[in-house]
Image: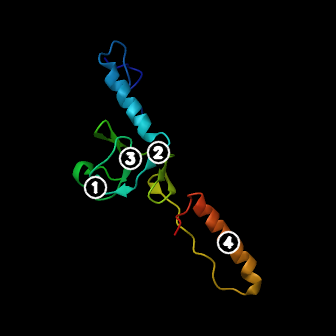
Amino acid sequence: MPDPIFDSRTARFELPLLFSGQTQKEGFVNESLARLDALLHLAIESELASPPSTPTDGQAWLVAIGASGDWSGQAGKIAARQAGNWLFAVPRDGLRLLNRATGQEMRYAAGWKAATRPAAPSGGTVVDSEARSSIAAIISALSAAGIVPAS
């Protein structure tokens, strides 16, 4: 019987909630732990439109637009492989992830956001050379930090 104070799932990441006297609580607890395991310190393998052929438990991907197969209708969500099954998580504002394929961090704020690499400075005169070197160093540091892509 549902608790009148709570819905059956949490508001942000849809973790299943337990109710007093509920049977088979391990299923709800295990699902909650699987979702937490997938989303805590999230690192995706890459962004794909179709499931990989040999996923490993513990891996996750960002589902691309035009998703097909088991991922059909899941675009923009996180697809995590847990216990041989796909677990899909709806992103919420503030969620951050590391894209292992690009080495870049992304964040969710009404959609996935990733910084773009600024153009390296060009042109100018001899007086401008120190400024160009400084800007290039800043771009390099942002790239090394995973804030902007490497190239």
Residue named by callout 1: 50
**Circles 2, 4 touching at the beta carbon (< 8 Å):** no
Of the residues under marks 1 and 2, which one precedes in the sequence?
2
Residue type, numbered disc 4:
Ile
Q: Residue at x 31, y 47 (%)?
A: 55
- The image quadrant that residue 139 belongs to is bottom right
- The image quadrant that residue 35 belongs to is top left
Q: Residue at x 25, y 51 (%)?
A: 72
Of the residues under marks 3 and 1, which one precedes in the sequence?
1
Q: Tell me the mark number nearer the camera, choosing from 3 and 4.
A: 3
Residue type, numbered disc 2:
Leu
Q: What element carries label 4?
A: helix
Calculate the distance from the C-alpha at mark 1 to the C-alpha at mark 2.
20 Å
Give the residue furthest to the top: 21
Q: Which of 26 and 144 is in front in this view?
A: 144
Q: Which of 14 and 71 is in front in this view?
A: 71
